[in-house]
Amino acid sequence: MLIRIPRRSEPRSSEITPESVWRERRRFVEAMGLSGIALAAPGLAAAAHRQDALRVLKGVHPSQWKVDEPVNSFKDITHYNNFYELGTDKRDPARFARHLKTRPWSVVVDGLCEKPTRFDIEDILSSFPLEERIYRLRCVEAWSMVIPWVGFPLSALLDRVRPLSSARYVAFESIYDPKMLPGQKRRVLDWPYREGLRMDEARHPLTLLAVGLYGKELPGQNGAPIRLVVPWKYGFKSIKSIVRIRLVDKQPPTTWNLIAPEEYGFYANVNPEVDHPRWSQKKERRIGEFLRRKTLMFNGYEEEVASLYAGMDLNRYY
Ligand code: MTE
């Protein structure tokens, strides 16, 4: 079990998000009508998303993309989450994941392409070769994990719709359904959650569409049934529960950049040299470890991705 020991250099949860978002937590809990008993017993609500209740994914191949570091436990990965559609506390997504219904589900890929397509999730699962990739995830809040994702490169999906040469960026949208997702009943964020990548970032072989972890389908709290994973960027770029991917010619608006542009840039590359305005990014706390470790440039993927940013001032494009 993880014992969380806050250090002076680590941001408190009240400091991480703009104050309005943090205050929303209390109102959210009240709106959900949660009793003290429900709050004290997160395991009850999370039972529907236990590891043994999840479907095993078939035909998953190991991949060359594997960091040689201990992998976080299933418990850590599924009980310490950011998924504001399910609440703003780290434990809320596991508690409320049962609200997220993931069938039927489809992902529309459209915009500047020859063949706009609506992909059904079952077709995605059966037609793209699935790989297990062990990636570091570094959150902007200065914690990190190592996660065994199952998925396939985003570029494989983009190839299917034949992007036009005018498509320079890719815009992503999460599901918007306030009836189903308790966190969306309030405007904590400007829903739906949105993210974006430059086309070369989107087509980079490391950029993954994840459909599972630990060999099984994704639990709701981790962004079921399909989410992005961009391992060299802060975690907020890795948008969950995607319903739309749009090819566009201009840099698309993104959720955290809209809410606090001076704190959360469009690029959001992990960079220990560029501090968040309210805390240092030089170190991180690996969930489950006691001592803080040094944060690596591009989260340790410098060799693979640094060339994407050659000539760019990374202090300006943070
Ligand atoms: N996607 C959506 N739709 N909503 C969110 O609140 N949070 C982001 C990202 N994707 C978020 C999201 C943040 S801040 C992080 S750190 C990662 O999801 C966390 O992913 P994990 O819970 O699987 O570790």
Image: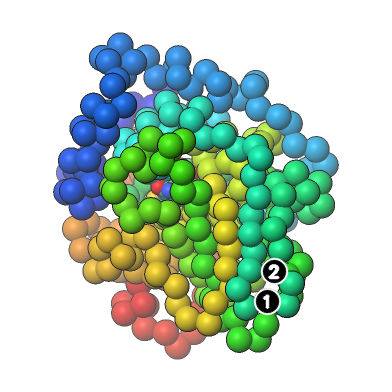
* Horizontal side of residue 79 vs 280, given as left or right: right
- Whether residue 27 appears in this view of the structure is yes
Q: Depth check: 33 or 270 in front?
A: 33
Vertical comparison of 207 with 310: above or below: above
Locate residue 75, reporting x and y percent. 50, 27
* Horizontal side of residue 110 vs 220, given as left or right: right
In space, the residues marked 1 and 2 are separated at their CA atoms by 6 Å
Locate residue 276, reporting x and y percent. 26, 62
Identified by mark 2, the residue type is Pro
Locate residue 111, reporting x and y percent. 60, 73
Find the residue positioned furthest to the top. 37
Q: Which residue is mark 1?
A: 113
What SS does tag 1 mark? loop
Locate residue 82, reporting x and y percent. 40, 43
Asked whether disc 1 touches disc 2, contact meaning CB atoms under 8 Å apart, the reply is: yes
User: What is the crowding at mark 1: few (fewer than 14 residues within 10 Å), some, or many (at least 20)?
Assistant: many
The label on residue 116 is: 2
